[in-house]
Amino acid sequence: MKNLFLLSFHDRDPLATRVSAGGWQVSSARRKDGVRGRFLSSNALIALVDLRDSVDDGLTAIVDLAGLDENHGIAILALADEGLQDDIAAKCHHAGATHFLDIANPHANLEQAIKFAYRYVENIRGGTEATHDFNKLLTQVGEQWSFSKLAVSQHWVSEKLESSLPEISFETYPATGIYRSLSIEERLRVRGAMERLRSGAAQAAVAHSLNGHKIIHHLYDSGERIYGRLERVMDNETDLGWAGRDLLSGLRNGSAARNWMSNRLANGHNLGLIMFGLKNFATINAAYGRTIGDEIMRRIGQRLITETIDHSPDQSLVARMDGQNFVVVMELDSDCADASQKYARYAEKLLSRVFEPISVEARDIGLVARAGVAIASESQDETLLIRRATLALAEAMVSDALPLKISGSSEKNILLEQQLEADLAHALERGDIAIALQPQIKVETGQLIGAEALARWNHPKLGFLGAATLFSVAERAGLMELLSSHIHKLAFKTAGNWPESLSFLRLSINVTAGDLANADFVKDMMQGIENAGFETARTTLEITESELIGDLRSAAQRLTALREQGLRIAIDDFGTGYSSLSYLKNLPVDYLKIDSGLTGDISGSTKDQVVVKSIIEMGHSLGLSVIAEGVETEAQLATLAEQGCQYFQGFLRSGPISAEEFEIFALRSN
């Protein structure tokens, strides 16, 4: 692998991640101080200098780097925005840059520009072979190591590293020699960096001490081998590289964010915390692949930096906590009377600007983002503040209508939520998750035609908890996939045990966008129905979260395969504002389910009547049946009947009831 040195004053880490994806080992800095020494220690032949936010400092750095070699044996690639300073290219050339790229130009290709810069180095140094040999020499004189991912015994350690660490037996411990000399805390950081590589990152870096020296340990994954390179930090250098950074997005990581909040709270500052989450991130990864998902994370990081750049870095922080969750934290004025509302308005602004659709590889990928807001006005504990924001985000995540939630959780409630998360895994094992069935009725005759299976949690201490609480806890605990599979199996088993006299009834189960993104969805669904002894022709899949379906084509193929086996498909919560005609056009649909929020006022609101009537007429024109949810009064039912709705469910006839109660209800009804 070839080395590259990067100097970027405000966009270092996202830029370094982008460059490393092209196969370069990147050493980076964000200040011009000591730039010559940093470049020489990187063993690089290309210097990439980003002048976009600090033109004067960038030009000074180029002058310093250009003076390193009278023969100009290195390439200096300057990045700038000509739209902000039209003579910047000439200034970079005068300072000593060998190459220039207007990075703001939509046609700019950074990867190719770096390749041209390296071709320049090859020409200056006598061709490709000579440059390759020189790179090998640089590798030998650097403190570097590597080993094969297939066999650790296939390892290599540079002469410089062996000679500088004679106390370590690299022959005995080729992969763990340095690791064994670190403190427990430093070992944990190394494990975290290696885990990022295992998760698909091209590079990682970790700060630690070695024989009293500060070290930035750069790690690279070439696909076949793991490479490591030691960069020694000067005693007066306080920037320990990427130790506190999320390498994918370039933002601070969760550990750095917690330390930042802890220090501010300890000094008596009031903090506002916004936690953002992508509701459809798992679907994006499943539909487009992890590489596209990583690019989405990187772009969101850049957008957050851009939108918050006007705030002082001493009083604000932007970080990627984990997975798809980002945070924006700011110091607030001492008067926090209306801080929640003010900060919520700021969160709404960021939601609208940062999470607009992102175009990747000619695909416009929609982002479904949610936010939770919490204010640290009573507690001086950053853990509690983060927890409150996390719970608020979780509530927003399970909401169809509200993209933002302000935390109202007390410390007692937070502790309860933590306990519920711990209890859920045991609940699945003990069988505490039960199925409730809500009857579905034919409008014209009042005949029972089937039931929708709904989940509820029979908690040993708190009693029955509804589906909203159950799925909110599962979302936070990372158990959504396991819970969904568990509920489907329970529902089919319950329906499979219905007596012969109820063999005419249909069963409807809810299917999420995450379920549809699973490559084994069709196989698992058919296996579940077969194992329960139920009939595919009596099964309806209700697609919830249809707005989160990332790959309509794949979803349509899977649903079509099931439909060919006799299953029927319904779009749930139609008319909530997230439903799209594209789903009706692209998915094989048999039913529309009108959201209960529309049927609630149908008997009194003219507008709601018009909306519901238009949905029913549209469904009929497409050859679809229509089911209304949330019907509670005879007046609502009469209006639906007048407008031609075929089926309904709601408390007018029955709410969700247990499997035993449903059998009694069904036998009496028919």
Image (spheres, rainbow, N blue to C red):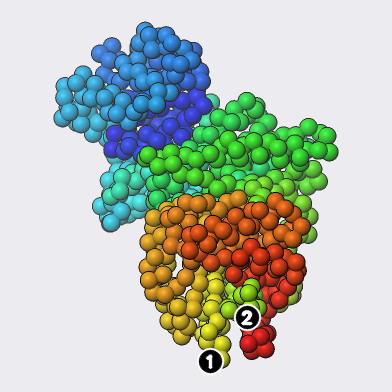
Answer left or right for 445 relative to 265. left
Element type where label 1 sits in the image: helix
Pointer 2 or 1: first along the chain? 2
Q: Quadrant of the C terminus?
A: bottom right
Element type where label 2 sits in the image: loop
| Comparing labels 2 and 1, the label whose residue is closer to the camera | 2
Given the image, on which type of amino acid does mark 2 rest?
Gln
Given the image, on which type of amino acid does mark 1 rest?
Glu
For residue 140, what is the image quadrant?
A: top left
Spatial CA distance of label 2 from label 1 is 18 Å
Q: Residue 447: which numbered mark, if any? A: 2
Residue 654 vs residue 137, the one in the foreground: 654
Residue at 20% x, 31% y: name it.
132
Above or below residue 437? Residue 351 is above
Discs 2, 1 touching: Cβ within 8 Å: no
Residue farthest along the front direction in this orientation: 642
Q: Is residue 533 visible?
A: yes
For residue 333, what is the image quadrant?
A: top right
Q: Quadrant of the N terminus?
A: top left
For residue 70, what is the image quadrant?
A: top left
Q: Residue 500: which numbered mark, if any? A: 1
Residue at 39% x, 20% y: name it.
102
Residue 556 vs residue 309, the one in the foreground: 556
Residue 628, image x and y in percent? 63, 65
Q: Is residue 415 visible?
A: no
Answer left or right for 153 relative to 300. left
Residue 164 vs residue 95, the one in the foreground: 95
Residue at 55% x, 48% y: name it.
368
Residue at 61% x, 71% y: name it.
647
Residue 18, image x and y in percent? 40, 35
Residue 381, image x and y in percent? 73, 48
- Label 2: how many Cα within 10 Å (few below 14, some 14–19, many 20+): some
